[in-house]
Each structure stands twice: as structure tokens, then as C-alpha cells.
Image (cartoon, grey):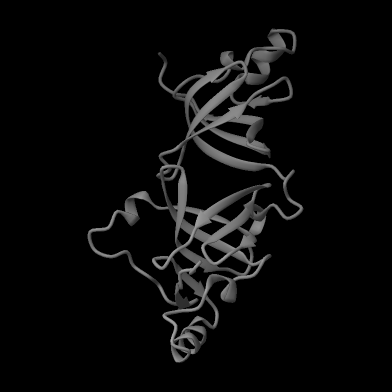
Amino acid sequence: MKFPSIAIACLALTLAAAPGSSFAQDAKTARGTVSIVADDALTIKMAGQEMKFSVDSKTSVEVVGGGTRMRQAQQAGQPGPKLTEVLKVGQPVTVSYTEANGVMHASTVRAIASAGAAAGAGRENAPKTMNGLVNSVTPTSLILSGSGGVTETFTFSIDGSTKVVGTGAGTATAAAGGKIPVTDLVKRGDTVSVAYHQMGSTLHAAEIRVTRKGAAK
């Protein structure tokens, strides 16, 4: 099997999408540490889960010393180095990718100094926070639209340990004898900040903080 060579660049190089491409519209970004690397695929670990990306000759890889590796490959008569020659297991990276038909294709892989909490290295149980607008809420789940231009929705599980914070929430809970359905405190259209834990593929809401009430329905 012949593996594709990769386009490689120095870390400082900024790459732009070709005119007319849909990269800017469709690209997503993942940040984590390399857990598996092959010449035609890359798997990274982030927030306790793994994401696998396909890699081909269109994938651009930005690493320190990339220019040297490229020259060495060209001197050897190769169009570029292989992915396994420039990335190793444990390397923190950010991956810009597009997804089609269930396959995530890496457009750009960039080596970074640290993957931070997203890598999940001993931090799987550390709470994360997401802000957004409530799409819907039930006694067992909350669907949120992410803020900052994020178009995806995120579903959080809710249980008896989930805490709701907001103006009047404490009073209403006390008046109900200490127990009140989350649907009485959080409504569609509210702006909230959710502190959550990733448990496998499930996002569990530890705390829902209502930062702004939506218009009354």
C-alpha cells in the first residue's frame, strides 16, 4: 500500500484556504494529544474521548522544523515526508477538519506546546463550561446552542445532582421544600452557563447558571 505524502510547513507559516473552497465555512477545530498516528490517519485524545481523522496529500501539517523535513524529502526524491515522520504519540496538536459521510478529514494539523484541558491528560473529571441559548429543556436533558458563532447544538443530561443558579432560583426551591423541577427554573430562550463533566459520550450538567432570562412566552 502506498501512503500519501503530506504538505508540511514551518510552525510560523499561516496557510490560507484556496479561493472558492468551502473550508472557511465548513471547517471545525479539535484540540488534543496524538494517541495513534499512521501515514493515512491520525487519532487524537481530547476530553477523555478519541477522534480519528483521515489524512491525505491535501493535509497540511505545521511543525517546528517542517522546512528542513520538506527539503530532506525533496532531496530523497519524495514529494514530502510522511505523517509518522513528523508527529509522534503524545504530541499536542490542533486539527482543523471537515466532516462528510461520517468521515472526518484533517485539513490542517498544527503542533502546539500544550493541549491544555482538552487533552484529558489527568483532567477528565475537571468541569468545563459552555455558554449559550436554551433550545429546549426537560427534567432529564438540556439542549443548548453554543455561543461565539458556534452553530451546533449540545445536549446535556440532567439529574438530581444538577444545581440551578439564577435570580429567584433559591427562593423558588425553598418554597417548594428543597426540590423543584429544572423546567420551572430554566426556560427555552434563556441564556445560561453550563458547568459540565464529560462522561464517555455523555455531557452531564453539574450546574446551570441562568445569566439572562428570555422573553416570556
- In the displayed structure, would residue 139 be above or below residue 104? above
Left or right: where 184 falls relative to 200: left
Residue 183, image x and y in percent?
A: 57, 15
Q: In which quarter of the image is residue 60?
A: bottom left
Q: Which of 167 and 44 is in front in this view?
A: 44
At 44% across and 24% down in the image, what residue appears? 189
Residue that lies at the very extreme toward the top in this rendered image: 176
Residue reaching furthest to the front: 1
In the depicted structure, whether residue 62 falls above or below residue 155 = below
Q: Residue at x 28, y 65 (%)?
A: 18
Which residue lies at the image location 59% right of the left edge and 56% below the top edge? 43
Q: Residue 92: where, in percent of width, then height?
A: 62, 64
Question: Please, which residue is most extreme toward the left here?
Answer: 20
Residue 48 horizontal/vertical position (percent) = 68, 47
Q: Which image quarter: residue 196?
A: top right
Q: In this view, does 204 lie to the left or right of 102?
A: right
The residue lying toward the viewer, choosing from 102 and 173, is: 102
Total labels drawn: 0
Give me the residue at 60% from left, 34% from top: 194
User: Which quadrant would the C terminus be assigned to in this image?
Assistant: top left
Say if 47 sits above or below 83 in the image: above
Asked whether 51 or 112 is in front, the reply is: 51
Locate residue 184, reporting x and y percent.
58, 13
**Is 197 or 165 nearer to us in this picture?**
197
In the image, 60: left or right of 176?
left
Question: Quick one: which residue is furthest to the bottom in this view?
Answer: 75
